[in-house]
Image (tube, grey):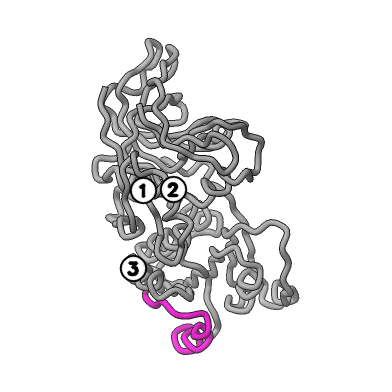
């Protein structure tokens, strides 16, 4: 089989490997669509939050088809369309253990969820980043048509938040310097998509007291500080963008004077079944997030595309191997 393999730091190739064997409590999955995340680039460059070792196969945003089951597996059958979580106890699928960027890979049933019939394999590979945004909204208390939500940053997770809060009925404002990403935000249901220099004037017109919820999805410290300025009295701020170690000045007194409720979130623990039901029932079309598609032979080009956020929102590797 063919697989994208990280051989050592900064060295990736498309390798010919044996199809892995499965234990009696495992399943063999044929990958169908695999998203490339910026964390996959960090991994190749030698950075991740828990220990890992090369060689390894990346790929934690994926959808696939079960093609073989172990003798003790009762929850899944050959032909099931599945997606899977990436945090598995102390391990991270696609990081500390090899992932889905291969024609075939091994999974435990406890990691897996059936992909609803309404969702394509492309959307299935977007469930992981969407679940991260969905989890942040849940932790913040949810939204409805009474809310004005400002989303700071239109990367894949910020755009996932945009799609979710828009279908929940909120007036949705996306703040993003890239015109292409602002256009994608509008395609996903945003009411407004503006340059950072325009947000105060827009809020003064549509929600003079400030946003009822600000979702910070850029991970840039100055923007994280600005969230406190844009939220209204007794509003909420949800921090989802990740930054480690950098600093920015912030008017922390606003937390008290505005009586703010602030939440932080990472990953999407415990919400995958809910996320899948939400996507299946809401009718959200996430396919505008996928701006480039590659076959497994061109997996290195997919990695390269992910290095260029000005032209790439999400690159997918698409596969069709059969046993």
For label 3, the SS is loop
Can you identify the residue that label 2 sits on? 36
Say which label, 1 or 2, has the lower sequence index: 2
For label 2, the SS is strand
Q: Circles 1 and 2: CB distance less than 8 Å?
A: yes
Say which label, 1 or 3, has the lower sequence index: 3
Q: CA distance from mark 1 to mark 2?
A: 6 Å
Can you identify the residue that label 1 sits on? 316
Q: List x then y, in percent, for residue 89.
A: 59, 31
The residue lying at 52 percent from left, 36 percent from top is 6
Q: In this rendering, which labeled residue sits more in front, label 2 or label 3? A: 2
**In which quarter of the view is residue 189 placed?**
bottom left
The residue lying at 40 percent from left, 76 percent from top is 179
Q: In this rendering, which labeled residue sits more in front, label 1 or label 3? A: 1
The residue lying at 49 percent from left, 72 percent from top is 150
Q: Mark on residue 189?
A: 3
Q: CA distance from mark 2 to mark 3?
A: 24 Å
């Amino acid at each position: 089989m063919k697989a994208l393999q990280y051989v050592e730091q900064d060295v990736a190739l498309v390798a010919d490997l044996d199809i892995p064997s499965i234990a009696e409590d495992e399943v063999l999955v044929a990958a169908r669509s695999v998203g490339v995340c910026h964390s996959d680039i960090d991994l190749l460059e030698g950075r991740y939050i828990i220990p890992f070792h090369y060689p390894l196969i990346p790929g934690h945003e994926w959808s696939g088809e079960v093609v073989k089951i172990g003798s003790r597996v009762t929850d899944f059958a050959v032909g099931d369309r599945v997606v899977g979580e990436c945090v598995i106890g102390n391990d991270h699928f696609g990081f500390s253990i090899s992932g889905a960027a291969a024609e075939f890979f091994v999974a435990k049933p406890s990691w897996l969820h059936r992909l609803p019939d309404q969702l394509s394999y492309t959307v299935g590979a977007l469930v992981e980043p969407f679940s991260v945004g969905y989890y942040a909204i849940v932790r913040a208390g949810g939204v409805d048509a009474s809310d004005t939500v400002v989303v700071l940053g239109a990367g894949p997770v910020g755009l996932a938040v945009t799609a979710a809060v828009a279908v929940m009925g909120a007036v949705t404002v996306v703040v993003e310097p890239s015109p292409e990403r602002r256009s994608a935000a509008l395609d996903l249901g945003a009411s407004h998509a503006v340059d950072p220099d325009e947000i105060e004037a827009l809020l003064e017109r549509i929600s003079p007291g400030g946003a009822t919820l600000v979702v910070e999805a850029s991970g840039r410290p100055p923007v994280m500080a600005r969230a406190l300025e844009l939220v209204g009295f007794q509003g909420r701020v949800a921090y989802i963008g990740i930054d480690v170690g950098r600093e920015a000045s912030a008017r922390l007194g606003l937390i008290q004077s505005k009586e703010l409720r602030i939440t932080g979130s990472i990953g999407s623990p415990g919400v995958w079944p809910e996320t899948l039901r939400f996507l299946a029932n809401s009718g959200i079309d996430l396919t505008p997030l996928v701006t480039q598609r590659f076959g497994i032979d061109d997996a290195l080009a997919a990695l390269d595309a992910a290095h260029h956020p000005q032209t790439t929102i999400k690159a997918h590797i698409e596969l069709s191997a059969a046993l």
